Amino acid sequence: MKKKHIPISIVSFGVLLVVQYLLIYNTFALRNNQYQVLERKSLDSAYRALLLNDKVFPGGQRIIDSLIRPQYDRFRQLQDQGHAQQTAVLAERLTDTILRALRTHSNMDTIFSRLILENDLDANLSYRLLLTGLEMTLDGKQYLNLLQGRYRITADQPYLVVDGTLQDINKQNLITSLTVSSPQANSYKIGFALHADDPDSRYTKILRQMTPTLLLAFIAIFLVVAIYYLTYRNWIRQKKMAEMTSDFLNSITHEFHTPITTITVASKSIGNMALMQRDEKISELSSIITRQSTRLQNLVKQALNITELNTYNIQKESYPIYDLMTESIDDYRLAVEHNVQISMRSELGRPALEISLNKFLFTTAVFNIFDNAIKYNRSANKVIAVSITETNGEIGIHIADNGIGLDEKQYQAVFQKFYRGKESGYMPGLGLGLFYVQKVAEAHGWRVEVRSSAEQGTTFTIWIASETN
């Protein structure tokens, strides 16, 4: 993944989220429209059967007829005289009387309970019986809307409640909507509707029905996020490896340049000295070439063969650990400056304790730790304190310094191949020293521990288990 691909990935993920949202929303809307289809059909059929020769509820037509028929002549008289305002007042009064009578004599509670029981429906269903229209015709052609004034049906109040307790009225819970009329003089047209629903568990049941869809959507999103994360993490790792490789190439070029240049200059000098017949200078320059060639050889060997270290290809012998560390420190002191102090103490209960190890690999690993202790140290007097302890059956070789230290994020990174911290920019090296230490420890079956804090120095400990001694 390249950096320029990250915005494309984010946009693609956003598109996926939108698609998943639309899928879930449309599925929910479909389920909502189809919710309790069978129950609604059963209620619709049963309710219509009760109203074959009736209106609103069984007995409702008789109530309406008894109230509206006596008023035909009065409405005709007012219309003939052109009294529109008095007609509206009479229509409002008549509607009020009809609505009050329907509410008073409504038997829908009993009827609805019986419909639920007979059709084996959800006992938690609630209903609402509505009056949706009421018009009168005196000539069979023109209709007078009786729902005027305070009873006028508008977009804000599209119905009048006759009976029931259902609060949320919508097209999804509509069971039946009927309009009954007679195309003859002195008649009326009436519209009424029945709604039923279980408001407390409707959405819970719909979401339960959508469980497979929701699970599939969440799994798809999770998988995409996981793939993006793994891809991004691999990209970060590859980028880090590329940077480490680049740093390694830059460092190794610098490291190889020094001995190669020295060998080249020394070779030319030998040529000139040979012409001048100065044997003592030739011997000195020959020694320089030998040392630098050996250094170059060691660099190449360290860079190319370090990963081949394992428990099967190293030869070990037993050495007194205290004497070996003393010898290593004495050898190292010869090559350091006067401002470096190296001390050692032993807390071993067995002074002559011997450890089975490869001497060359061990001393090289110790020297690498010493090199880091001096290289990454800004103190005027550089101190390296070595101690040997024995705890819980393990031998600990502790190498502490007063250098610049490490933060916790670097504890594991310092042992990676070619790793060089931000403080290493001005220091020569290949980033292989501590990696070499780790490989040597692993080849012997040991472990390396680091404790440090910024500007407080660092302590490396090589733990040698008693069973590997």
Image (tube, helix red, strand yellow):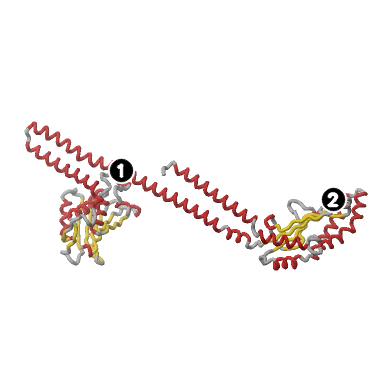
Residue 64 at x, y percent in the picture: 84, 60
How many other residues sit within 10 Å of disc 1, few (<14), some (14-19) or many (≥20)?
Answer: some
Q: Amino acid at mark 1?
A: Asp
Residue 295 at x, y percent in the picture: 18, 44
The reply, left or right, for residue 462 in relation to residue 320 is right
Q: Is residue 389 visible?
A: no
Q: Could you say whether the residue bearing mark 1 is in a helix, strand or loop?
A: helix
Location of residue 389 (image quadrant): bottom left
Q: Earlier in the sequence, mark 2 or mark 1?
A: 2
Q: Is residue 174 visible?
A: yes
Q: Could you say whether the residue bearing mark 2 is in a helix, strand or loop?
A: strand
Location of residue 251 (image quadrant): top left
Residue 369 at x, y percent in the picture: 24, 52
Which residue lies under the disc numbered 1?
Answer: 247
Which residue lies under the disc numbered 2?
Answer: 143
**Image quarter in which the N terminus is found:** top left
Gap in angstroms between the C-alphas marked 2 and 1: 94 Å
Viewer-proximal residue, 442 or 308? 308
Viewer-proximal residue, 446 or 111? 111
Q: Amino acid at mark 2?
A: Tyr
- The number of numbered badges drawn on the structure is 2
Q: Are marks 2 and 1 in contact (CB under 8 Å)?
A: no
The reply, left or right, for residue 423 in relation to residue 31 is left
Residue 292 at x, y percent in the picture: 17, 42
At x 86%, y 49%, the residue is 141
